[in-house]
Image: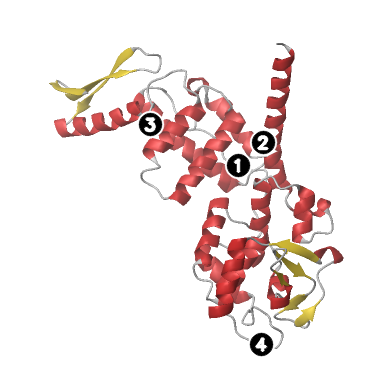
Amino acid sequence: MAYFRKRDNGWEYRISYKAPDGSYKQKSKSGYRTKAEAVQAASQAEIELSSGIVEDKNITLAEYFEKWMLVHKKPHVGPETFGKYEYTLKLITRYFHETKLSKINATSYQNIINELAKCYVKDSVKRFNSHIRAAIKVAIHQGILKKDFTEIVKIFSDVESKKEEDKYLELDEYEQLITDYRKTIKYQSHFFLYTIGKTGLRFSEAAGITEPIVDRENMCLRIRRTYKVYGKKKGWGPTKNPQSERDVPFDSEWLKAYDEYMKVGYIDNPDKRLFTKLTGTGENKILKKKTRQTFNVHGLRHTYVSWLIYHDVDVVTIAKLVGHKDATETLKTYSHLFKAKQEESFDKVRNLMEKFGADLGQ
């Protein structure tokens, strides 16, 4: 419960609360111009205290950030945006481990940024820093920290920004895109983009989908040829390489969407091709407008692969799914993503070995 009184420098609030160690403490702050301002500040402080965000000098950065984002972000942002904060928390846990918030200074923080810069593009590093900086401002306001260790940080990256054809969406953006296009599959271009997003097919492979290659029994698309919608070699042709002749799995939701599309969006044609109105540039424009960034159909294929990597699908399987010549091509194309994932693998190995050592010592 909060108590208020007027002092020489303005209104003051005082709150009694129970700390994590079981002891009872008080939090107070003065200098508010009106009692209403003090009441508002006290209400916010009580929310933070009840959520565990207190002046705990032993709290780790990961613990503090998690509690901060649940109080200050989750109620005020959408699921997509909050997902980005959750991803930042994941990176904090991976790179800072159990480091106490009070033990981080400008130098140790810059060292972490330097490590991140080896694996992530500049925009990702910048977002990571901005999220932490926002949390740190609250920590300073609460008196947990005296200085902002993010204030003089230098943001950079050793990873080159992606070219247009190599761009891919963040995973939460990708999942939202798939969800949105699922609702509008009556439009040919939308079902086309939905299909590539769900299967990682190349443009010409998806353009060549016909009714006969949809294998309902085995839940896969049997890719054996392609269809080019423009250029001198317009029309039917072979796959890019022998490895591209493959079976690509689809899920039950795609099959439902396919059945709906065949009833409301499919245009009958001699070749029985699902998509007959493709232009290439048109689909890219639709994606750019939807994502509000420089992004094209090939980037959607890249995003599908990044999603597989994120969910720990092994590189050999990924190579087969997307029709690469071998796993080496996959590793080369997505080296920066595998490098980031490698850090997680290293942590798993360390934890396994530590557990192994602990078991031996018993």
Q: Residues within 10 Å of mark 4 (few under 14, many from 20)?
A: few
Residue 133 spot, x, y in % from top left: 46, 35
Counting residues from the start of the chain, the first of labels 2 and 3 encountered is 3
Residue type at tag 2:
Glu
Q: Nearer the N terminus, badge 2 or badge 4?
A: 4
Dot 4: element: loop
Give the foreground label among 1 and 2. Answer: 2
The residue carrying mark 2 is: 344
Q: Looking at the picture, which amino acid does disc 4 mark?
A: Asn
Residue at the spot 53% in from the left edge and 52% down from the top edge: 172
Q: Which residue in the structure is indicated by mark 4?
A: 269
Q: CA distance from mark 1 to mark 4?
A: 53 Å
Residue in the image at 82% along x and 51% along y: 327
What's the CA distance linking mark 2 and mark 4? 49 Å
Q: Residue furthest front?
A: 217
Quadrant hosting residue 136? top left
Q: Amino acid at mark 1?
A: Phe
